Image: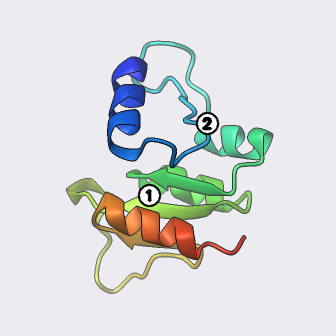
């Protein structure tokens, strides 16, 4: 999965990211909390499709970009917390990254 992800990022977003960090949630290795990785590596922005990971990371001061997916919808009566923004496309992600002033 790591190799495929890195190839995909390079083919679609060459030079746009300084690094991609993997937490072993799907590889069978020892999983690491994404909030820990962000905190330890002083990461300011987390791009994620899991609202749970973003909520945990937000608690450490990370700005979250939530890629819209059916499994991360929230009821209309509930807004996303401040510091987490939903986008529908990778182009939307790039726009949010450009606007980030952290």
* Residue plotted at (44% across, 63% down): 94
Which residue corresponds to mark 2?
33
Sequence-wise, the earlier of marks 2 and 1 is: 2
Point out residue 23 in the picture as x, y percentages from the top left corner.
55, 29
Which residue corresponds to mark 1?
51
Given the current orientation, which residue lies at the most extreme top position? 28
Point out residue 34 in the picture as x, y percentages from the top left corner.
60, 40
Q: Quadrant of residue 79?
A: bottom left
Whether residue 90 sits left or right of residue 82 in the image: it is left
Whether residue 4 sits left or right of residue 93 in the image: it is left
Given the current orientation, which residue lies at the most extreme bottom position? 77
Q: Which mark is residue 35?
A: none
Q: Quadrant of residue 55?
A: bottom right
The answer to whether residue 81 is above or below residue 35 is below
The residue lying toward the viewer, choosing from 71 and 15, is: 15
Q: Quadrant of the N terminus?
A: top left
Point out residue 43 in the picture as x, y percentages from the top left corner.
70, 49
Disc 2 crowd, CA 10 A, few/some/many (<14, 14-19, 20+): some
């Amino acid at each position: 999965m790591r190799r495929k992800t890195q190839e995909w990022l390079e083919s679609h977003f060459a030079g746009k990211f300084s690094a991609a960090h993997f937490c072993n949630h799907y590889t069978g290795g020892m999983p690491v909390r994404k909030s820990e990785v962000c905190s330890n590596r002083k990461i300011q922005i987390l791009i994620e499709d899991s609202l749970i990971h973003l909520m945990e990371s937000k608690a450490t001061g990370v700005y979250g970009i939530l890629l819209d997916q059916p499994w991360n919808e929230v009821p209309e009566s509930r807004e996303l917390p401040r510091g987490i923004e939903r986008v529908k496309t990778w182009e939307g992600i790039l726009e949010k990254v450009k606007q980030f002033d952290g």
